[in-house]
Amino acid sequence: MKIASWNINGVKARLETVLKWLEEEQPDVACFQEIKSVDENFPRTPFEELGYNLETHGQKGFNGVAILSKRPFEEVNRRLPGDEEDEQARYIEAVIAGDNEPIRVGCLYLPNGNPVETEKFPYKLRWMDRLHKHAEKQLEKEEAFLLVGDYNVIPEPEDAKKPEAWVGDALFRPESRQRFRALLNLGFTEAVRATNSTAGTYTFWDYQAGAWQRDNGIRIDHLLLSPEAARIMQGVGIDKHVRGWEKPSDHVPVWVELSA
DNA sequence: ATGTCTAGTGAGACTAGA
């Protein structure tokens, strides 16, 4: 089972690009972030015509996440627990039937957190604390559980072409990186890190300042696997070439193959 | 080299968010 994650930066603006990628890569499960659409306006039909079931959790204007699956959903949960006041659509979780066992997939769009001197940064940190608690609880189920998405965290200096440019940024602040490490230390395997030398491996290149042409990227989209998922991991990849397509997202898809 | 993109509002020489 191939499970992919991609921050598509607007489903309506990216529709042709996303459909082309789905036809090319044929993931069994695709987790999208920044759909920038309310549920009612999400263009479901072209995805359904490719054979996908589809669950969305959107909001007006920005944010929004979705999970597509060729296999049926057994369970779907929206919202990250821990703050009933939080109206931002950043988390959706689904259980999907595997060949031998169910696969639980959490699709997340972690807050950016900039500028750090505003309320956005403490919101990011609180959101990470909520994610930690939720992950801890779900790990107790001892299922194949994946937490994938746009983490908006550069884990290590080698995950940026120019780490010095990110000092002080919410994506690279010690508080953000510490929380990401704490999440990993619950027992997750970070799929790309575990299987590659990650230096020079990026998932995001800014639209500005010729970042793509200069390979000025960062690695902020991550695939976290529970021990039960890591045990059946068959392969991992980053579809870097997609960043060079017409009308690209600023992120590229990352994926993991499981024997499930 | 701060050199961009998307959605929303309402019609911008806009704004917010990233």
Image (cartoon, helix red, strand yellow):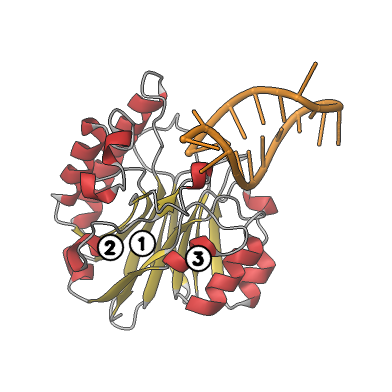
Identified by mark 3, the residue type is: Val
Q: x, y percentage for residue A163?
A: 27, 40
Residue at left offset 38%, top offset 70%: A3
N-term mark: 2 or 3:
2
Where does label 1 land, which residue?
A105
Frontmost of labels 2 and 3 is: 3
Identified by mark 1, the residue type is: Val
N-term mark: 3 or 1:
1
Left or right: residue A38 versus residue A77 is: right
- Chain at tag 3: A
Determine crowd level at label 1: few under 14, some 14-19, many 20+ residues with C-alpha closer than 10 A.
many
For the N terminus of chain A, the quadrant is bottom left
Determine crowd level at label 3: few under 14, some 14-19, many 20+ residues with C-alpha closer than 10 A.
some
The local secondary structure at tag 2 comes to strand
Where does label 2 land, which residue?
A145
- Chain at tag 1: A
